[in-house]
Structures are given as structure tokens and as C-alpha cells.
Image (cartoon, rainbow, N blue to C red):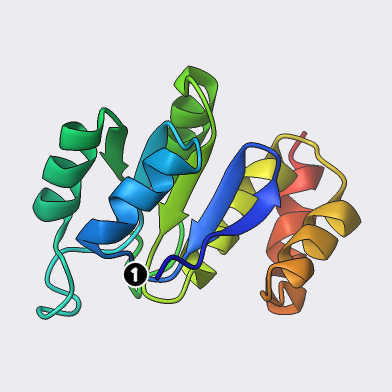
């Protein structure tokens, strides 16, 4: 059962997806699946290659930007920015709970100059609290 949570018109997040969720993503119009979960983090969960294979079978693009316990980096934000620019349709990103995928998106959008309150509101509507991330978002927005 899919649990896709929209953060914007073209970006949604989800907790760990199953192989079956890939077909549901296709049916809901997603064009790209972004895996933010490092392989091996949960051996029982479908690993990146399995999701990539299922995505290819459905005609969906797939990319991995693993976010481990070390946190976020500018190269990860850069990678997401490049994927979003190149995406041919809506994007579905996932990790264990959807939190890292939400945080990565929020940091990238803050760095791009989007309204931080609006970013936080969108995340809250999807069930994610960005209050702890606010100082980093403010710092990234100030880098502009």
C-alpha cells in the first residue's frame, strides 16, 4: 500500500517503498524515483537495485542519493537539484520514513531561495516537522 506524501506539485516523499509501490508510482504519474536510503541499512527492505529494476520495467527513471547517519552535504543537494531540473515529470523520493527525503528537498529548496515558511508548511502537511532543520535552512538561504 503506497504512502506517497506530496510536498509540492512535482515532488512527493514516502517511507520505504515496495516493488509493488513502483507500479503505483507509475499509475499516479511519477516520472522519477529517488532513493535516499543507503543499501544495506535494512537488509530485509528492497535494496536500490531491486527498486531500480522495477522502475525500469515500468518506464520510470531511477536515481540514488543515499543519505546516511552522517547527515547532508552540498554534493547531495547538488545531485537533487540536477535531478529535479532534468526530471520529465513528478518525482517520488523515499527513505526509511520519508524524513531524510523531506529534509533533502527542504534544504535544496531553501538554498534555491524558496520561502522557508512555505517549505515548512508543506512538510508539516505531509507529516514532517522541520523545526530542527530551520537553522540550517536559514543558513543556506543566507548563502544567496
State whether residue 22 is above or below residue 79: below
Query: At 14% across and 62% down in the image, what residue appears?
Result: 47
Position of residue 116 measured from the top left corner of the image (x, y, whole percent): 84, 53
Position of residue 128 measured from the top left corner of the image (x, y, whole percent): 66, 74
Position of residue 77 measured from the top left corner of the image (x, y, whole percent): 50, 43
Crowding near the residue tagged with mark 1, few <14, some 14–19, many ≥20 C-alpha atoms within 10 Å = many
Q: Which of these two is toward me, 20 or 63?
A: 20
Q: Is residue 124 left or right of residue 17?
A: right
Q: Secondary structure at mark 1?
A: loop
Query: At 11% across and 53% down in the image, what residue appears?
Result: 50
State whether residue 140 is above or below residue 138: above
Query: At 80% across and 63% down in the image, what residue appears?
Result: 120
State whether residue 67 is above or below residue 58: below
Query: At 52% across and 32% down in the image, what residue appears?
Result: 81
Position of residue 73 measured from the top left corner of the image (x, y, whole percent): 45, 52
Q: Which of these two is toward me, 28 or 67?
A: 28
Task: Give the residue pinned by disc 1.
Answer: 16
Q: Which of these two is toward me, 20 or 70?
A: 20
The image quadrant where one finds the N terminus is bottom left
Residue 38 visible in the shown view = yes
The image quadrant where one finds the C terminus is top right
Q: Quadrant of residue 39?
A: bottom left
The furthest residue to the front: 27
Q: Which of these two is toward me, 108 or 88?
A: 88
Amino acid at each position: 500500500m503506497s504512502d506517497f506524501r506530496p510536498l509540492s506539485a512535482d515532488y512527493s516523499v514516502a517511507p520505504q517503498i515496495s516493488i509493488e509501490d513502483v507500479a503505483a508510482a507509475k499509475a499516479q504519474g511519477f516520472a522519477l524515483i529517488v532513493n535516499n536510503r543507503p543499501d544495506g541499512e535494512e537488509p530485509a527492505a528492497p535494496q536500490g537495485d531491486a527498486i531500480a529494476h522495477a522502475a525500469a520495467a515500468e518506464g520510470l527513471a531511477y536515481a540514488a542519493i543515499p543519505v546516511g547517519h552522517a547527515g547532508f552535504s552540498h554534493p547531495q543537494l547538488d545531485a537533487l537539484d540536477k535531478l529535479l531540473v532534468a526530471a520529465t515529470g513528478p518525482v517520488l523520493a523515499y527513505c526509511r520514513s520519508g524524513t531524510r527525503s523531506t529534509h533533502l528537498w527542504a534544504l535544496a529548496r531553501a538554498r534555491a531561495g524558496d520561502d522557508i515558511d512555505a517549505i515548512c508548511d508543506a512538510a508539516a502537511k505531509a507529516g514532517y516537522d522541520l523545526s530542527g532543520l530551520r537553522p540550517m535552512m536559514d543558513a543556506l538561504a543566507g548563502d544567496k
